[in-house]
């Protein structure tokens, strides 16, 4: 019998063993297939996953980009969709996101319901994920599209309670997001407090532009860090 690979279990096991994971986020609308091989070659040696998704993506682009990446890389490709239209059966797994920091039903449950017909007959591993939008110093595309207000970085008790509510409601991962192009990332204090309160792995993304910021997130307790904009435009620095 062939053992079925679980990407969630791999992330959980890495968390238990304190092995830090790194994902590179690919925005399908910004991905150039003509430079795909070069893009894959430039991935950090430490990269463990590739996330694919964006706040808004042209219809059909996600499938095209996922297929190209799967042909060039052995890394797991996990969907990080802004809405139900960004679901591709060619990926390995799907972060089934709920924007639990907001109160817009469209991103708490409506998009999830609309995605069911697209995912129920695929081989995608579905990973229930609580998504918390944190103020990163500017209005990000996530905030504009979701029409929700991010939690301020000094609202630590509220952030922790929101994260715990996600865990108690069955989420398997917790994603702390400052948003693409954030002026500053999620603070170490937030990461420390959330990580100490939860029993599930914590992912942190948004505004991370340097190795120093990456290490700071790891040291604070992030199990996985996601880099996107800085890697895309070549500004990620050591």
Image: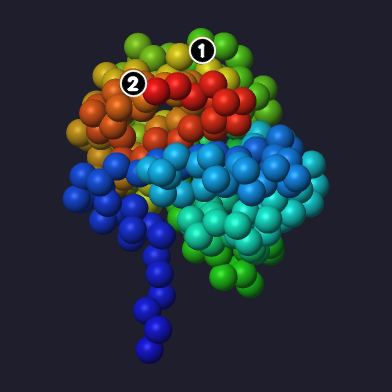
Quadrant, the C terminus: top left
* Residue 211 position in % (x across, y down): 37, 25
Q: Residue at coordinates 63% horizontally, 61% vertically from top-left?
A: 71
Can residue 96 be seen here? The reply is no
Instruction: Tell me if residue 171 comes above or below residue 30 in the rendering.
Output: below
In primary-sequence order, the first of circles 1 and 2 is 1
User: Quick one: 7 or 71, which is closer to the camera?
Assistant: 71
Q: Position of residue 74 (x, y in %)?
A: 50, 60
Whether residue 46 is situated above or below residue 219 in the rendered picture = below
Quadrant location of the N terminus?
A: bottom left
Task: Provide residue 57's location: percent of width, then percent of height.
Answer: 74, 39
What residue is rendered at 25% in x and 33% in y?
221
**Camera-side mark, 1 or 2:** 2
Tag 2 residue:
212
Q: Which residue is mark 1?
A: 183
Q: Residue at x 36, y 21 (%)?
A: 213
On screen, residue 147 versus residue 197, left or right, reads right
């Amino acid at each position: 019998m062939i053992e079925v690979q679980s990407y969630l279990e791999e992330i959980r096991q890495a968390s238990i063993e304190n092995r830090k994971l790194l994902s590179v986020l690919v925005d399908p609308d910004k991905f150039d297939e003509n430079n795909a091989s070069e893009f894959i070659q430039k991935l950090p040696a430490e990269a463990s996953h590739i996330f694919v998704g964006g706040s808004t993506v042209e219809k059909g682009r996600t499938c095209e980009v996922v297929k190209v990446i799967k042909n060039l890389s052995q890394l797991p490709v996990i969907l990080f969709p802004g809405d139900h239209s960004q679901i591709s059966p060619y990926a390995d797994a799907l972060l089934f996101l709920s924007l639990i920091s907001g109160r817009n039903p469209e991103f708490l449950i409506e998009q999830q319901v609309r995605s069911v017909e697209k995912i129920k007959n695929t081989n995608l591993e579905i990973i229930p994920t609580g998504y918390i939008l944190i103020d990163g110093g500017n209005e990000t595309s996530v905030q504009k599209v979701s029409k929700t207000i991010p939690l301020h970085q000094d609202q630590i008790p509220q952030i922790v309670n929101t994260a715990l509510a996600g865990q108690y409601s069955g989420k398997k991962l917790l994603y702390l997001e400052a948003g693409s192009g954030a002026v500053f990332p999620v603070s170490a204090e937030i990461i420390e407090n959330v990580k100490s309160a939860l029993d599930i792995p914590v992912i942190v993304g948004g505004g991370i532009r340097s190795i120093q910021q990456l290490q700071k997130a790891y040291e604070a307790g992030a199990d996985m860090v996601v880099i996107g904009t800085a890697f895309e435009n070549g500004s990620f620095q050591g």
